[in-house]
Image (spheres, rainbow, N blue to C red):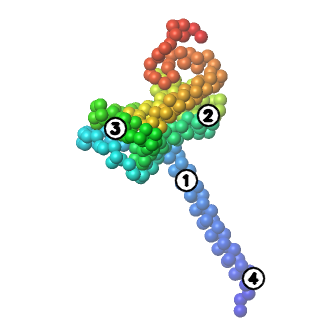
């Protein structure tokens, strides 16, 4: 009868154990390597895939309006909860193009996400705003007035097409703004980033915020409701305050270089408006 503690058997067991451990470690390291490569691929191509998807959806939406040139009835939209979820995910993911490590982004981003959710629910779920209006005043408003397709009663299906164009422009501003500033500033260590004045930043200082405001404005063009009309001015105020705060930080970091850049550009729009003559001449 062979003893369990026989050197020969114990040595074979140890050898087999070492082989098994090595194989497990190899699988772990292989998995980590694949995960690292996947992360690099996602970081490099993920935003491009995402914005390409949004552009494709916008183009398909515009083509749909050409194939079906009629405004559907407002009540046919409600109760479509899968559409609510899809809409929130589709336009909520744009927030990943912002630096969430900054606490200053939380309030505007939260307000934007709340706007997206409110729009999706009011358009595809339940028209809470109109229910409240009917409860207070005892009557419903006609389609297109604080519910339904906002511009449909005036320009028909072109109202939806206008909204799609604003969606597309807003999404592109978010993406190209992210691409330029991530490459030269966000991806660098603190204090080593460059002042971004090329690309879309050559014309406006906050293209991403302009993009988010255009996207939400497009939603108003498509389906303006009481809650959304109340939320949009708040959203503008939050992004304006955030932009002013960031510009103050940029002036502290880059000094006169940023002040010169600031004089040559506008905050949100691609042209200078309401500029004082003294500033336009280059005097601080």
Residue 51 at least partly seen: no
- The mark lying in front, picked from 1 and 2, is 2
Q: What secondary structure is marked by label 4?
A: loop
Indicate the position of residue 224 as horizontal and vertical percent values. Answer: 41, 36
Which label's residue is closer to the chain start, 4 or 3?
A: 4
Q: From the viewer's side, name the closer residue of 134 and 120.
A: 134
In which quadrant of the rendered image does the C terminus lie? top right
Which residue lies at the image location 61% right of the left edge and 26% below the top edge? 245
| Cα–Cα gap, marks 1 and 2 | 31 Å
Indicate the position of residue 9 as horizontal and vertical percent values. Answer: 69, 81
Which residue lies at the image location 63% right of the left edge and 25% below the top edge? 249
The label on residue 35 is 1
| Cα–Cα gap, marks 1 and 4 | 42 Å
| Cα–Cα gap, marks 2 and 4 | 66 Å
Graded by Cα atoms within 10 Å as few (under 14), some (14 to 19) or many (20 or more), the crowding at tag 2 reads some
Which label's residue is closer to the chain start, 1 or 4?
A: 4
Dividing the picture into quadrants, the one containing residue 279 is top right
The label on residue 104 is 2
In which quadrant of the rendered image does the N terminus lie? bottom right
Q: From the viewer's side, name the closer residue of 22 and 159.
A: 159
Location of mark 4 (residue): 5
- The mark lying in front, picked from 2 and 4, is 2
- The mark lying in front, picked from 4 and 3, is 3
Q: Are marks 2 and 4 in contact (CB under 8 Å)?
A: no
The label on residue 142 is 3
| Cα–Cα gap, marks 1 and 3 | 54 Å
Q: Are marks 1 and 3 in contact (CB under 8 Å)?
A: no
The relative height of residue 29 versus residue 273 in the rendered view (above or below) is below
Residue 107 at least partly seen: yes
Q: What secondary structure is marked by label 1?
A: helix
- The mark lying in front, picked from 2 and 3, is 3
The relative height of residue 160 versus residue 274 in the rendered view (above or below) is below
């Amino acid at each position: 009868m062979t003893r369990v503690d026989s050197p020969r058997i114990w040595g074979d067991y140890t050898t087999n154990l070492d082989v098994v451990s090595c194989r497990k470690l190899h699988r772990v390291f292989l998995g980590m390597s694949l995960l690292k490569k996947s992360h690099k691929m996602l970081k490099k191509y993920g935003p491009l895939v995402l914005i390409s998807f949004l552009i494709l959806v916008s183009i398909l939406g515009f083509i749909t309006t050409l194939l079906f040139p009629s405004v559907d009835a407002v009540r046919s939209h409600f109760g479509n909860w899968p559409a609510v979820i899809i809409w929130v995910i589709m336009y909520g993911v744009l927030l990943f193009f912002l630096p969430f490590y900054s606490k200053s982004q939380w309030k505007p981003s939260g307000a934007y996400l709340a706007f997206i959710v409110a729009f999706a629910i009011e358009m595809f779920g339940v028209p809470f705003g109109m229910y409240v209006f009917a409860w207070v005043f005892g009557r419903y408003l006609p389609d297109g007035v604080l519910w339904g397709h906002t511009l449909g009663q005036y320009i028909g299906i072109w109202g939806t097409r206008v909204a799609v164009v604003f969606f597309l422009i807003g999404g592109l501003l978010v993406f190209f703004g992210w691409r330029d500033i991530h490459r030269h500033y966000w991806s660098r260590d603190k204090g080593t980033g460059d002042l971004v004045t090329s690309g879309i930043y050559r014309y406006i200082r906050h293209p991403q915020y302009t993009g988010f405001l255009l996207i939400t404005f497009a939603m108003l063009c498509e389906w303006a409701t009481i809650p959304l009309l109340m939320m949009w001015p708040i959203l503008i105020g939050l992004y304006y305050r955030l932009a002013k705060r960031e510009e103050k930080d940029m002036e502290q970091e880059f000094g006169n270089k940023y002040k010169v850049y600031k004089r040559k550009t506008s905050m949100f729009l691609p042209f200078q408006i309401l500029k004082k003559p003294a500033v336009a001449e280059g005097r601080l």
